[in-house]
Image (spheres, helix red, strand yellow):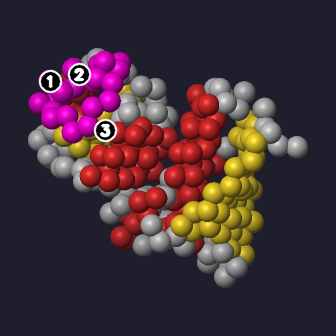
Amino acid sequence: MIVRDIIDILEGEIICEGNLDQEILTACGSDMMSDVLAFVKDQSVLLTGLVNPQVVRTAEMMDMACIIFVRGKVPDESIITLAKARGITLMKTRFRMFTACGLLYSNGLSGGCKV
Amino acid sequence: MSAIHLHFDVPGDDFTRAGEASGSTKKRLKALGYDSDAIRRVAIAMYEAEINMVIHANGGYCDVDVYPDRVEILLADDGPGIEDIDKAMQEGYSTAPDNVRSLGFGAGMGLPNIKKYSDEMRIDTKLGIGTKLYLTIKVH
């Protein structure tokens, strides 16, 4: 799956475009950034309902390619600026967290951890 | 002698800037050609510690020494100190105020995550004086 596929699956809207052809192997859904930081995965996307600059910084530390804001949440300009400078794609979807994660999972994306 | 020394002040009054020191360090290590997994461990450990400094101690400073085989990081603050280190090391234990949780932190994973990603971790803390956190992360 590449970032571009996620746009279709989640009926997403791109807010800030990074590399849409980046391959994605795993995903992580959480509003608690320390829980995201607890499990390193490769080539991952982050689904979150949290909208603040630390979401982008967390993705930066984890080398994540894409952040998906669920429930149609819209980041402000400071968040978009941070993401642009780091080449991270920002996307929003109208789906709620559970549904968005379920859609990606059923399309073949795994959590990347055994637990 | 260290190959490269980096120093950062971490402002305590601006949560949005927390992570700048870790991000800059990460960029620098990348430019130096270190292994990406190792860089990620440095970045995450340092980022969690930076967030801790902002949440609990009104900021502080970081000194980073980059050697060919390891990165040594000192994070120092003059905050309230850690009352019970054993408890603070437990996953899920947090003394962070509720408003921090609405920012995505305060889940009680900070110090456990830092320990997990570091090869060596030492905490020197005194109540009412401050905390010094020493981290060593092997990078090859």
Secondary structure of residue under mark 3: strand
Give the number of the disc on residue A8: 1
Please state if B104 lies on the left or on the right of B4 as rendered.
Answer: left
Residue topped by disc 3: A67
Q: Is residue A38 magenta?
A: no
Given the image, what chain letter belongs to the residue carrying mark 1? A
x and y, in percent, of residue A68 in the image = 26, 38
A30 over B76 or under it: above or below: above
| CA–CA distance in space, label 2 to label 1 | 7 Å
Please state if A104 lies on the left or on the right of B54 as rendered.
Answer: left
Which residue: 16% across, 25% down? A9
Given the image, what chain letter belongs to the residue carrying mark 2? A
Which residue: 43% across, 63% down? B15
| CA–CA distance in space, label 2 to label 3 | 13 Å
Which stretch appears magenta?
A2-23
Question: Which amino acid, mark 1?
Answer: Asp
Which residue: 32% across, 63% down? B102
A43 over B47 or under it: above or below: above
Residue A27: quarter of image: top left
Please state if B72 lies on the left or on the right of A70 as rendered.
Answer: right
Q: Is residue A21 magenta?
A: yes
- The reply to whether discs 2 and 1 touch (Cβ–Cβ < 8 Å) is yes
* Chain-order first, disc 3 or disc 1: 1
Question: Which amino acid, mark 2?
Answer: Arg
x and y, in percent, of residue A43 in the image = 42, 25
- The reply to whether discs 2 and 3 touch (Cβ–Cβ < 8 Å) is no
Residue topped by disc 2: A4
Q: Quadrant of the C terminus of chain B?
A: top right
